[in-house]
Amino acid sequence: MTAAEFLLLAVMAQRAGELVLARRNTTQLKARGAIEIAPRHYPLIVAVHATWLVSLWVFGRDQPLHITALLGYVALQGFRIWVMGTLGARWTTRIMILPGEPLVTKGPYRFISHPNYAVVSAEILVLPLVLGLPVLAAIFTLLNALVLAIRIRAENSALADRSGIPAVHVQS
């Protein structure tokens, strides 16, 4: 197994675990009365992320790792953990509005409205660079930006339109 394959397996295992956690949290939030907002764009997000991972496997599995970029990617995982830890059971991959719950304003949310989107955007840029794939980094950074434009617009609209109903911040 190459170092690149090991890294990609680790990333895929992390993402799979996060999907399990997100599904559990979404189910629990819905049981508490949460409402999903703008679910129609969710398959597009999944498609971009899945295609990104497949592309990394196809083009990067035999590439040497660029250590500086790898250190950056590892640092991003600390920010990912900070976001997820701050949200706790409110972390999910969907946009959920939970009546009666205040917006999260601690942790990274003190500094930026959508810290998870910032982390994911940076990961989509940096991981291909770890594998020496700058063209994939550019392509998927652009695709992710297009998808996030839809998602952030939907989330911000839900937050502005909630008529006093606080929202749950989510992860993409």
Image (spheres, rainbow, N blue to C red):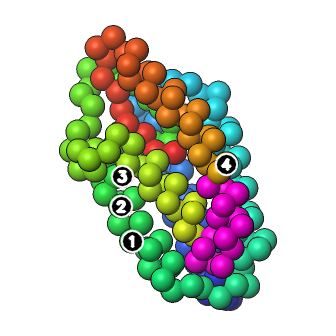
Q: Residue at x 57, y 70 (%)?
A: 127
The CA span between labels 3 and 2 is 9 Å
- The secondary element bearing badge 2 is classed as helix
Residue type at the position of mark 3? Met
Residue type at the position of mark 2? Phe
Disc marking residue 84: 3
The CA span between labels 3 and 4 is 24 Å
Q: Which residues are magenta?
A: 128-141
Q: Residue at x 44, y 52 (%)?
A: 118
Q: Which residue is label 4 attached to?
A: 143
The total number of labels drawn is 4
Vertical order, 167 against 55 (above or below): above
Q: Quadrant of residue 156?
A: top left
Q: Which residue is label 1 attached to?
A: 75
Mark 3 or mark 2, earlier in chain: 2
Q: Nearer the viewer, mark 3 or mark 4?
A: 4
- The secondary element bearing badge 4 is classed as helix
| Residue extending farthest right | 58
Mark 3 in CB contact with mark 2 (< 8 angstroms): no
Disc marking residue 107: none
Residue type at the position of mark 4? Leu
Mark 2 or mark 4, earlier in chain: 2
Mark 2 in CB contact with mark 4 (< 8 angstroms): no
The CA span between labels 3 and 1 is 15 Å
Q: Quadrant of residue 25?
A: top left
Q: Nearer the viewer, mark 4 or mark 1?
A: 4
